[in-house]
């Protein structure tokens, strides 16, 4: 059985990965929405701020190498 720290790290990495995928879907949907440039820009800015705030605590800079090994397609 995994120890609690390793399991918590694995879950944080998975949650980060899932959120990244969700934000990619949001940005793809925004690109296809045919909104006027001003509205698209405002919404994109809101999404970027949300992404930045939502992800910044899940994977530290020190853990990025381990995260990249677990989810290599995200860091290429």
Image (cartoon, helix red, strand yellow):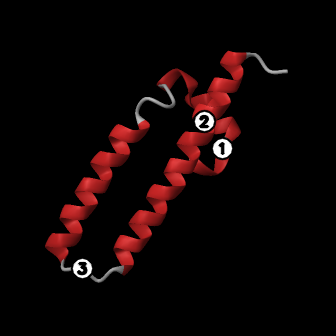
Assess whether mark 1 and mark 2 are in contact (beta carbons under 8 angstroms). Answer: yes
Disc 2 from disc 1: Cα separation: 8 Å
Which residue position holds label 2? Answer: 13
Which residue position holds label 3? Answer: 35
Residue in the picture at 50% in, 49% down: 19
Q: Earlier in the sequence, mark 2 or mark 1?
A: 2
- Secondary structure under the numbered disc 2 in the rendered image: helix
Q: Is residue 8 above or below residue 39?
A: above
Q: Earlier in the sequence, mark 3 or mark 1?
A: 3
Q: Residues within 10 Å of mark 1 (few under 14, many from 20)?
A: some
The extreme left residue here reads 38
Which residue position holds label 1? Answer: 71
Disc 3 from disc 1: Cα separation: 33 Å
Q: Position of residue 5 (x, y in %)?
A: 66, 17
Q: Is residue 22 above or below residue 68?
A: below
Give the left or right position of residue 41, taking residue 29 as reference: left
Residue 76 in sight from this viewpoint: no
Give the left or right position of residue 42, taking residue 64 as reference: left
Q: Position of residue 24 (x, y in %)?
A: 47, 60
- Secondary structure under the numbered disc 1 in the rendered image: loop
């Amino acid at each position: 059985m995994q120890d609690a720290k390793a399991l918590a790290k694995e879950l944080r990495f998975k949650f980060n990965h899932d959120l990244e995928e969700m934000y990619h879907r949001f940005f793809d949907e925004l690109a296809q929405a045919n909104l006027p440039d001003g509205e698209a820009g405002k919404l994109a800015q809101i999404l970027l701020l949300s992404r930045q705030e939502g992800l910044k605590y899940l994977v530290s800079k020190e853990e990025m190498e381990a995260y990249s090994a677990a989810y290599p397609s995200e860091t290429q």
